[in-house]
Image (tube, rainbow, N blue to C red):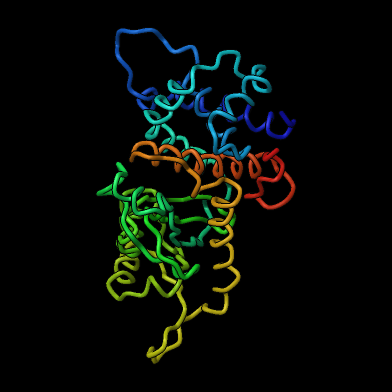
């Protein structure tokens, strides 16, 4: 394993282990009576992050790679079915770790947020859609940026200009972006109590009621002026470069972390794999910011080989 990834993995493992000791309620539930797993929860989650950063979408290939190259860090590797089952059960744990790492980053205190959503395709053929266990969760939606329809879910993301995930949600493809953005903010008290915060969005987030709720939470919405508005919106000249940032964050998730090649067939599996990729992005930004690594905070180039 390359030295940069080795350093990140070691720091991440120690941090996760400390967090789970300090917050035992974050750990996945397991029977009171039973055999303690040889692979700890901290090792499990660190291994999942390494898999995402190295770009392995095939777990069979990753397991062969881990058996050859990662035995020094992980002396015990369980069977793949056991790894998959434990990773699905660790979804809530990964959410806690993402939040803890994000709050430890200097960019967490940035007074500007960017919000957007991106498709998470879950199938293309009619037969896949008919027999999928995701029925009732996934739906048909339209991706305006690629001018195409898709069947799947939609990942909503609020991020800082450095790309750090502040809040996220996985919904049906048809769920209203504004309702989801408000729910993400209201569900986390740390996000509601941010008076003076600015939220930059595209014109799809235009709504008087949406903007009024943001104002009540002390958040100012920055969006493009749309045709028919008599008064031009303020700060719109800054929109283009910052919109490119949130789009590049989505591109990082898709091109480098293979967001759409998640391989999940059931709701729990899809959620675990999306969280795995969000955690990998957060962990990389956390490591880059807190150890003063050169280059952009969201750069994964040092870890993907």
Residue 264 sits in which quadrant?
top left
Q: Looking at the image, can residue 212 be seen? A: yes
Quadrant of the image containing the C terminus:
top right
Percent coordinates x, y for residue 20 in the rendering: 45, 24
Q: Looking at the image, can residue 192 be seen? A: no
Q: How many marks?
A: 0
Percent coordinates x, y for residue 282 in the rendering: 54, 43
Q: Residue furthest front?
A: 127
**In-front residue for pair 18/13:** 13
Percent coordinates x, y for residue 124 in the rendering: 41, 54
Horizontal side of 18 relative to 9 (left or right) equals left
Q: Residue at x 41, y 69 (%)?
A: 220
**In-front residue for pair 17/31:** 31
Q: Residue at x 49, y 11 (%)?
A: 38
Horizontal side of 132 relative to 285 (left or right) equals left
Residue 195, compared with residue 168, is above or below; it is: below
Q: Residue at x 57, y 59 (%)?
A: 161
Residue 40, compared with residue 172, is above or below; it is: above
**In-front residue for pair 21/5:** 5
Percent coordinates x, y for residue 127 in the rendering: 34, 49
Residue 6, compared with residue 225, is above or below; it is: above
Residue 264, compared with residue 228, is above or below; it is: above
Horizontal side of 163 relative to 214 (left or right) equals right
Quadrant of the image containing the N terminus:
top right
Q: Residue furthest left?
A: 136
């Amino acid at each position: 394993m390359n030295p940069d990834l080795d350093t990140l993995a070691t720091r991440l493992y120690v941090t996760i282990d400390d967090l789970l000791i300090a917050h035992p309620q974050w750990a996945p539930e397991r029977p009171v009576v039973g055999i303690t797993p040889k692979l700890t929860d901290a090792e499990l989650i660190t291994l999942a992050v390494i898999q995402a950063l190295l770009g392995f979408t095939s777990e069979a290939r990753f397991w062969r790679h881990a058996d050859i190259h990662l035995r020094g860090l992980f002396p015990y590797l369980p069977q793949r079915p056991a790894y998959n089952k434990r990773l699905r059960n660790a979804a809530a744990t990964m959410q806690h770790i993402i939040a803890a790492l994000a709050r430890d980053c200097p960019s967490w205190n940035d007074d500007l947020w960017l919000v957007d959503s991106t498709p998470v395709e879950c199938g293309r053929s009619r037969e896949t859609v008919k027999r999928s266990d995701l029925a009732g969760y996934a739906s048909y939606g339209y991706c305006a940026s690629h001018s195409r329809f898709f069947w799947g879910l939609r990942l909503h993301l609020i991020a800082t200009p450095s790309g750090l995930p502040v809040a996220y949600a996985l919904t049906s493809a048809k769920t209203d972006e504004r309702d989801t953005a408000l729910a993400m903010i209201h569900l986390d008290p740390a996000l509601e109590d941010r008076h003076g915060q600015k939220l930059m969005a595209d014109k799809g987030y235009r709504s008087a009621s949406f903007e009024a709720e943001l104002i009540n939470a002390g958040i100012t919405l920055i969006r493009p002026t749309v045709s028919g508005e008599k008064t031009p919106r303020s700060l719109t000249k800054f929109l283009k470069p910052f919109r490119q940032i949130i789009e590049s964050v989505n591109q990082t998730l898709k091109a480098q972390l293979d967001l759409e090649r998640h391989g999940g067939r059931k709701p729990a599996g899809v959620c675990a794999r999306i969280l795995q990729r969000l955690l990998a992005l957060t962990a990389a930004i956390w490591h880059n910011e807190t150890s003063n690594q050169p280059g952009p905070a969201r750069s994964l180039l040092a870890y993907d080989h």
